[in-house]
């Protein structure tokens, strides 16, 4: 499945980080990031956000 492909994650990270930046910029409190399957994608997005911003 595309959802579990590491290359797919790499391709989707910029979009996910942009969405996270938008949510944070709204200034309405905390932003919760989660991965339904528990495969480490949520931490990958959080770390990518910290790296890019």
Image: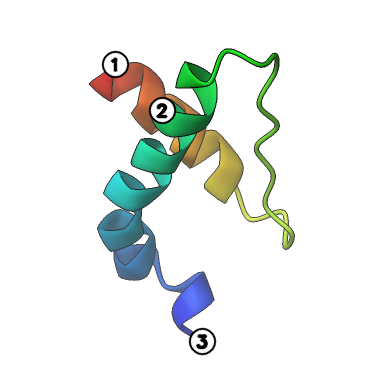
Q: Nearer the viewer, mark 3 or mark 2?
A: 2
Which residue corresponds to the image point at 51% horizontal and 74% vertical from the top-left? 3
Q: Are marks 3 and 2 in contact (CB under 8 Å)?
A: no
Q: Give the x, y percent position of residue 45.
A: 46, 38
Relative to residue 38, is residue 47 depicted above or below? above
Other-residue count near label 1 (Cα within 10 Å), few / some / many at <14 / 14–19 / ≥20: few
The quarter of the displayed image where residue 30 is located: top right
Disc 1: which residue: 53
Q: Nearer the viewer, residue 31 or 10?
A: 31
**Image position of 22 (left or right of 52):** right
In the displayed orientation, state which residue is furthest to the bottom: 1
Q: CA distance from mark 2 to mark 1?
A: 9 Å
Circles 2 and 1: CB atoms closer than 8 Å = yes
Picture coordinates of residue 50, whole percent (x, y) = 38, 18
Query: Measuring 51% from the left and 86% from the top, which residue is drawn there?
Result: 1
* Number of marks in picture: 3
The residue sitting at 54% across, 49% down in the picture is 41
Return the mark for residue 42. Answer: none
Query: First in sequence: mark 2 or mark 1?
Result: 2
CA–CA distance in space, label 3 to label 2: 27 Å
Image x and y of residue 34, in percent: 69, 44
The crowd level at tag 3 (other Cα within 10 Å; few <14, some 14-19, many 20+) is few
Element carrying mark 1: loop
Q: Earlier in the sequence, mark 1 or mark 3?
A: 3
Residues packed near mark 2 inside 10 Å, few (<14), some (14 to 19) or many (20 plus): some
Disc 2 is placed on an element classified as helix
Q: Nearer the viewer, residue 28 or 2?
A: 28
Residue 39 horizontal side relative to residue 53, left or right? right
Q: CA distance from mark 1 to mark 3?
A: 30 Å
- Which mark, residue 1? 3
Q: Which residue is mark 2?
A: 21
């Amino acid at each position: 499945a595309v959802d579990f492909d590491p290359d797919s994650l790499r391709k989707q990270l910029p979009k996910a980080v942009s969405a996270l930046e938008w949510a944070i910029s709204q200034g309405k409190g905390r932003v919760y990031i989660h991965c339904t399957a528990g495969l480490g994608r949520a931490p990958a997005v959080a770390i990518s956000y910290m790296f890019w911003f």
